[in-house]
Amino acid sequence: MTHDSPYLKPGRLADVIAALQFLGQYKDYKLSVENWNKKIASAPRSASSSFQGGTTSWAIIFDEHAEFFRKNDDGLISLVWRRAITKTQEGQRPPLEPGTISTLIDTAVRLYSTALEAKKADEARETQSTLNRRWWIQVAVSILTAVLAFVGLLLAARIKGSRSP
């Protein structure tokens, strides 16, 4: 069983943390992917999907990490926790407190650690399974060694017998 967590992509944890910080503090709580791409103003390091003009889009980060990000019916992306906050009289949701963002980052780090541990466990099981399937090699080598020793013994006895007067 292979553990395919998006957290295991190189640079993904850093991208998730960056998005959490930005979407948690930016004055607008929901924007289109295109607008988030412009506002964040740098491509995610772990994404491989292309966006307009050959740049890489944050859409893949938002899509693969629904534990933090959501797209509404209008296609606007927001941070789940921020959507849970009551809107102000102006119809906006206030930025998250630094402690809340820290909690989200800690959660991302724990999810990464869990994915890494699961991958290591999968690799250990696979290695053990491979070793378990190779038991016959040890048995075959032991039998071959015994057969060769027996043949050597017979040859030695025959040679010794042919030298006797």
Image: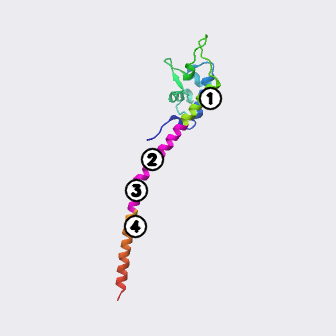
Cα separation, mark 2 vs mark 1, equals 36 Å
Residue at figure coordinates x 43%, y 51% from the top left: 130
**Residue receiving disc 4:** 145
Q: Is residue 60 above or below residue 75?
A: below
- Of the pair 61 and 80, the residue shown nearer to us: 80
**Dot 3: element:** helix
Q: Which quadrant would residue 31 be assigned to in this image? A: top right
The numbered mark, 2 or 3, whose residue comes first in the sequence reads 2
Residue at figure coordinates x 63%, y 26% from the top left: 99
119 to the left or right of 149: right
Q: Which mark is residue 135?
A: 3
Which residue type does callout 1 highlight? Ser
**Residue receiving disc 1:** 102
**Residue receiving disc 2:** 126
The numbered mark, 1 or 3, whose residue comes first in the sequence reads 1
Cα separation, mark 3 vs mark 4, equals 16 Å
The numbered mark, 2 or 1, whose residue comes first in the sequence reads 1
Cα separation, mark 2 vs mark 3, equals 15 Å
Depth check, mark 1 against mark 4: the one in front is: 1
